[in-house]
Amino acid sequence: MPRTEQAGPLPAGLLRRSCMAATLTPIIGGMPHSFLALTGISKLYPGVTALDGVDLRVSAGEVIGLVGENGAGKSTLMKILGGVVEATGGEIEIDGDRVDRLSVNGSMRAGIAFVHQELNLFDNLSAAANIFIGREPLKGGPLRLIDTEALNRQAKPLLDQLGADFRPDTKVADLSLAQMQLVEIAKALSLKARLVIMDEPTSSLTVTETNRLLAVIGRLKAERVAVIFISHRLGEVKQVADRVAVLRDGRLVAELARSEIETGTMIRHMIGRDLKTLYGPPAAPPGHAVLELADVRTSYRPDQAASFSVRAGEILGLAGLVGSGRTELARAVFGLEPILGGEIRIDGRKVGLRSPREAIQHGVYLVPEDRKRSGLILSFRISHNISLASLKSLSRRGIVDGAAERREAEAQKKNLDIRCLDTTAEAGSLSGGNQQKVVLAKWLSMQPRVLIFDEPTRGIDVGAKNEIYRLMRELSDRGVGILMISSDMEEVIGVSDRIAVMHEGAIAGFLDRSQFTEENVLSLAVGRAAIREAAE
Amino acid sequence: MNRKDLGLLILILVVGTVVAIINPRFLSPVNLSNTANLIGLFGIFALGQAFVIISGGIELSVGSIIALLGVIFVDLVSLGTVNWSVAFAAVLALGCLIGLVHGLLITKARLQPFVVTLCGLLIYRGVARYYTDDATAGFPFGASFPTLEWLVAGRFYGIPHSLIAFIIITIIMAVVLHRSVFGRYLFAVGKNEEAARYSGIHTSRIITAAYVICCGLTAVAAVFIAMYTRSISPSSHGNFYELYAIAAAVLGGCSLRGGEGSIIGVVLGTVLLQVLQNLVNLLGIPSSLNFAVMGSVILLGVLADQQFYRTRKSVARAAG
């Protein structure tokens, strides 16, 4: 994506000021306690500017909230700090020494530790063994046996310090997600970490567990350990951060001091543009309900029932926090998970969907979240991926009609503007956006009644995103009912005609376009507010 | 025919030429006819193995199935109570049933293919030995079944019927694997079962069908082999035949990870293995070294292929 030099009016001023500060103040000693200083960090990928002149300083015992939309550059910045990715421009200083190239080892030596979204633990080993992996205390002797007692003894104070409620010899597989995070943090402490970077640590935690984690952050702070807290949950950021850095489109658009941290301010800086520009209104008012869920219960939260309907010609956004049961519900509708109660109706008729095959026979298709694993066969040709679900109609007496298959692939390539040299190329050779179009093409070569999109634009660049949205609208205008699961607030608000918000396995409420605000969605998602349900 | 198959063909021609130069008897009609017969016998069940390997599984009980179905067939025919064609149909049905059971254990009971078919290997061998009281099964003295013998062990202008059967089966299986909807589904399931299921493919049915095809073809091969050896000692008949089949499939470009392979490759793999066997005999190499020669050639071939592939990839990367 070519980047224009113009930024929103308010953040541009802020940015300029921070750049000036960096060039005018002598770097060493400019900020008394900052042991880590990033100046003008840029990262260019072919065709994409992931980071553009970002400055960030970290002082001992400081909690920095790092917020920004998906794709704003947060993870790239963190990868640079971890030494996984090399910056294409800018300077990194650790304890006043300039580091030319931060390697993974260099980052570890500097005391930077990560608590990842996907935890990097060996779940067949105990908590203590994970904390000291690669540095196990040995009994001595030629066999290099592990001194398990010493291992547990050394792990205990680390875990106690974090208020852990489990023994060091507990197998990680038996721990809850929150407890696993404590193991990761204990591991960081054992490595004498000075900076712990937490990437969406609370996304899968319950409220109690979240509060406990926030308390742990307080303890780290007391130990003079700095924390970078990356989260979409602005309430938590507000609660815990001393300072907030806002990234947007690869730039640091604002740094807010403790007194300036307000949810509204953060959102304004994060978004920085009018959300409604995404929205293309439907051509006609929605028709009858093509998909209805009545008190559907899944094994994920058997005690909670969900009911909603998707109408023909409508895009229904399904919002909610990660772990609220949206994906599980979609899986149930697509026949991947059994339904424990309630019923699913298609065009008003009750159906039993026991496998994806049956769902597809009823015209219910899913564009899955993990397209590389569940959506595509990467080593298959593009044309073979497109025909995979409709192969029987492209064959005669069980033999594939190769010419018809090619024609269909070419038609879909043109129709969806799939950018490839040839439809005989491997699907894996395409960019993310084009891969998603191939998944979509697979379903469009058939007759969809209901299309479920699970995180339709994850990992897709902005240009391709807009094309996907346009295609969704085109489909809905053709009378297809669209159910879109998304964690991207901009997407949910910008694309949906109506939003259903899930909270802990149940629908917390519906919102009409007039009620679409980030606050409304969020407060339903966290199960806090009762917003009057939109008229069905 | 892709690059890999071409390499295999060249290797066969090179090995064949070298053997023919050292020992011209390699090209004698008798030797060629014998080798062709063996290619037919081993090729039929190697094709079946390829289907299972492409589905992402493995079938280890092939040798034991050949022993068990062999003794049953010989017994049924020599008893004379049923016509040989009925016996053939019965053995074929039993083979398919065995495949069905394997497939269901793998897809419904979710057992690993290796475990299921390893148990099959032990069970069928044991049953075969029990069935004949560990005695050698054979036809009674003087018994003859002219039609059956002509069909299965006869020659057409010197071409053994087993090879003709193999060619016919190869053509059918090539259409099934490379042209049919089932074949496409099989590759899809082998490569990415989850994506296949998400596309509405009945994955467990496809996998089960692969085992039915494999064991069915093995049953056909069992009859040919039984009529070739004419007597079956159930403790050794068909020993290690599954490994010949797996080796042929792997040589022919099937990946044990599933989703890759071609019929032409398996055919060439089978041919190469039999030429190597023949080479050991004709070049006066001690026959005890038979397996060692085969293993070494396969290892070198796979290694060379891997090396070639890597160089090509890095060249492509440097160019890109």
Image (cartoon, rainbow, N blue to C red):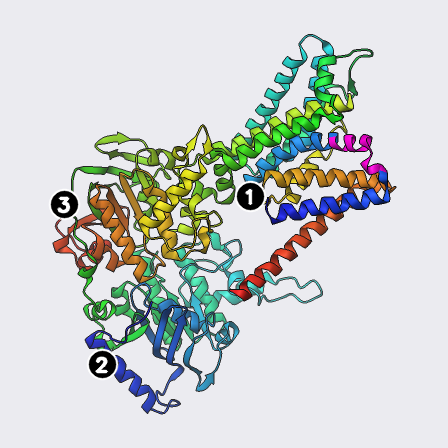
Q: Does the magenta stretch include residue B32?
A: yes
Q: What residue type is labelled 1?
A: Gly
Please tell me the numbered disc located at residue A13: 2
Is residue B110 visible in this depiction of the protein?
no
* Closest to the observer, A202 or B191: B191
Identify the element where label 3 is drawn: loop
Output the chain of dot 1. Answer: B
- Residue A384 position in % (x across, y down): 44, 43
Seen from the viewer's position, the closer of residues A31 and B302 is: B302
* Quarter of the figure that contains the N terminus of chain B: top right
Drawn side of residue B124 relative to residue A71, left or right: right
Task: Give coordinates of residue A460: x percent, y percent.
Answer: 35, 59
A165 and A238: which is toward the camera: A238
Q: Name the residue under label 1.
A: B258
Q: In which quarter of the image is residue B250?
A: top right
Span colored in magenta: B25-36
Report, in whole angstroms, how far the alpha carbon at label 1 lies from the one at label 3.
Answer: 48 Å
Judge whether residue A389 is colored magenta.
Answer: no
Report how many numbered discs are placed on residues in the image: 3
Query: Three-letter amino acid code at disc 3?
Result: Ala
